[in-house]
Image (spheres, rainbow, N blue to C red):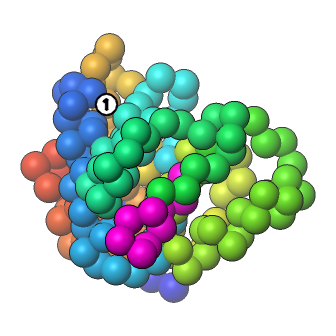
């Protein structure tokens, strides 16, 4: 296992956050490797907006909504899949087993909103994204991984990278 690396980003609008997500989704699609994208942040910090951007960058053309009540949405893109989880309403690890969580987060591409509820249940191939509210529209975003390299994270962050 590599050391944890982190890169800091800043977005100023909802559109910026979604555009960063598109960059990430396109990078994941082009890379072709499995990756779990773990989103962490308080209510209203932009997890769903970021997820929408990731899905669009990955190639999803249908409407992208948070699966708060469905728990998981599946998007099919050219014979590949993107699995989008919202685990906010889950309380116990056994519930993950019941929804097939491990099948869809290991050796796949997945997004997990509220991932900090079950941090030890995510695969090694995880990119952690921490979103923090600066003001009504601006967000501080930190990418953390011990799977991807610092160069990968800078490439993913593109023009939104600050202070690295």
Q: Residue at x 33, y 23 (%)?
A: 134
In percent of width and height, residue 91 lies at 84, 42
Q: In terms of depth relative to the viewer, which is nearer, 25 or 37? A: 25
In percent of width and height, residue 159 lies at 10, 49
Q: Residue at x 61, y 75 (%)?
A: 106
Q: Residue at x 47, y 23 (%)?
A: 44
| Residue 88 vertical position relative to residue 103 in the rendered view, above or below | above
Q: In terms of depth relative to the viewer, which is nearer, 87 or 151? A: 87
Q: Give the magenta-colored segment's residue range.
A: 76-84
Marker count (numbered):
1
Q: Is residue 36 left or right of residue 103?
A: left
Which residue is labeled 1 in the image? 139
Q: Residue at x 29, y 59 (%)?
A: 59
| Residue 37 vertical position relative to residue 108 in the rendered view, above or below | above
Magenta stretch: residue 37 in it?
no
Q: Report helix, strand or loop for mark 1.
A: strand
| Residue 3 vertical position relative to residue 143 in the rendered view, above or below | below
**Mark 1 closeness class: few <14, some 14–19, many ≥20 residues within 10 Å:** many
Q: Is residue 59 left or right of residue 110?
A: left
């Amino acid at each position: 296992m590599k050391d944890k690396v982190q890169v800091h980003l800043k977005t100023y609008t909802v559109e910026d956050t979604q555009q960063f997500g598109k960059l990430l989704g396109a990078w994941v699609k082009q890379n072709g490797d499995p990756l779990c994208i773990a989103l962490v942040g308080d209510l209203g910090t932009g997890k769903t907006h970021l997820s929408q951007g990731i899905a669009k960058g990955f190639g999803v053309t249908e409407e992208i909504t948070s699966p708060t009540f469905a728990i998981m949405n599946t998007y099919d893109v050219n014979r590949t899949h993107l699995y989008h989880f919202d685990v906010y309403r889950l309380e116990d690890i056994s519930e993950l087993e019941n929804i097939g969580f491990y099948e869809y987060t290991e050796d796949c591409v997945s997004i997990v909103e509220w991932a900090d509820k079950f941090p030890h249940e995510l695969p090694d191939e995880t990119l952690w994204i921490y979103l923090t509210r600066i003001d009504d529209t601006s967000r501080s975003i930190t990418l953390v991984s011990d799977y991807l390299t610092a160069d990968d994270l800078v490439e993913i962050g593109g023009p939104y990278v600050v202070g690295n």
